[in-house]
Image (tube, grey):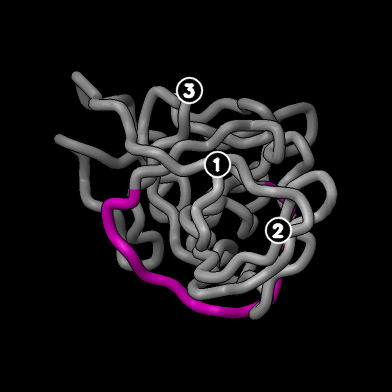
Amino acid sequence: MLTRALASFVLVCSLAACGGDDGGGSVDAAPAIDAAPAIDAPPTPTGLTGLGQTCGQGLPACPANASNCVTLQGAPASFCTPTCLENGSGTTTAMAQFQSVTPAPNNATCTAAFTGSVGTAACGLILAYTPMDTPLVANKAYTGIQLACAIACGASNACPTGTSCTQGICLPQ
């Protein structure tokens, strides 16, 4: 499960490729989705392969186990991530965060795509949902929920090499 700090972090994702599985896990973040800003020069690679691998123009393509290339608002680079839930449905809490999603998100997909030794791979990065309210509305039912993985920061905000802890998530530098 990603930290509660992720819930306050505004995530803006640009989906470059799709793939994923259904399975078990939990969600505690509900960010908005929008187009990613252009990147002028290739960023420094993270050293990770799979989840957290730096991606984008001039960089190696994302591997099959983490085929989405996403950009989060405020991050200097895009990173690879697998889809860990497709076509889910759920209801938000009074705090406008997903309370439960069915089928349950698949954290095993995230763990399998993560090669780092610091931080925790978890399913909770929201890519899409219907209706596309921005932000999510409290106590409302949603369908078409699509989630991807992120790396939650470790103890003392530790992250894999080439990433740094921002609002509880390890993001490329």
User: Cα distance, mark 2 to mark 3?
Assistant: 22 Å
Q: Position of residue 96 (x, y in %)?
A: 74, 47
Badge 1 marks a residue whose secondary structure is loop
Residue at mark 2:
27
* Mark 2 or 3, nearer chain start: 2
Q: Position of residue 110 (x, y in %)?
A: 56, 62
Q: Secondary structure at mark 2?
A: loop
For the residues bearing labels 1 and 3, Cβ distance under 8 angstroms: no
Q: Tell which of 64 and 75 is nearer to you.
A: 75
Q: Residue at x 24, y 39 (%)?
A: 56
Q: Which residues are magenta?
A: 15-29
Magenta span contains residue 23 = yes
Magenta stretch: helix, strand or loop mostly? loop
* Residue on which the image places disc 1: 134
| Left/right of residue 14 with respect to residue 4 in the rendered view | left
Residue 11 belongs to the span the image colors magenta = no
> Which label was assigned to residue 48?
none
Quarter of the view holding residue 103:
bottom right
In this figure, which residue is indicated by the disc labeled 3? 74
- Which residue lies at the image location 24% right of the left edge and 26% below the top edge? 38
Chain-order first, disc 1 or disc 3: 3
Locate residue 59: give its quadrant: top left
Residue type pointed to by label 1? Thr
Q: Which amino acid type is shown beneath numbered disc 2?
A: Val
Give the distance between the C-alpha atoms of the residues marked 2 and 1, in whole angstroms. 18 Å
Q: Is residue 1 or residue 119 the one in the foreground?
A: 1
Mark 1 and mark 3: Cα distance apart in space: 18 Å
Q: Are marks 2 and 1 in contact (CB under 8 Å)?
A: no
Q: Residue furthest top?
A: 40
Q: Percent x, y for residue 171? A: 51, 33
Q: Residues within 10 Å of mark 3 (few under 14, many from 20)?
A: few
Specify whether residue 115 is in view: no
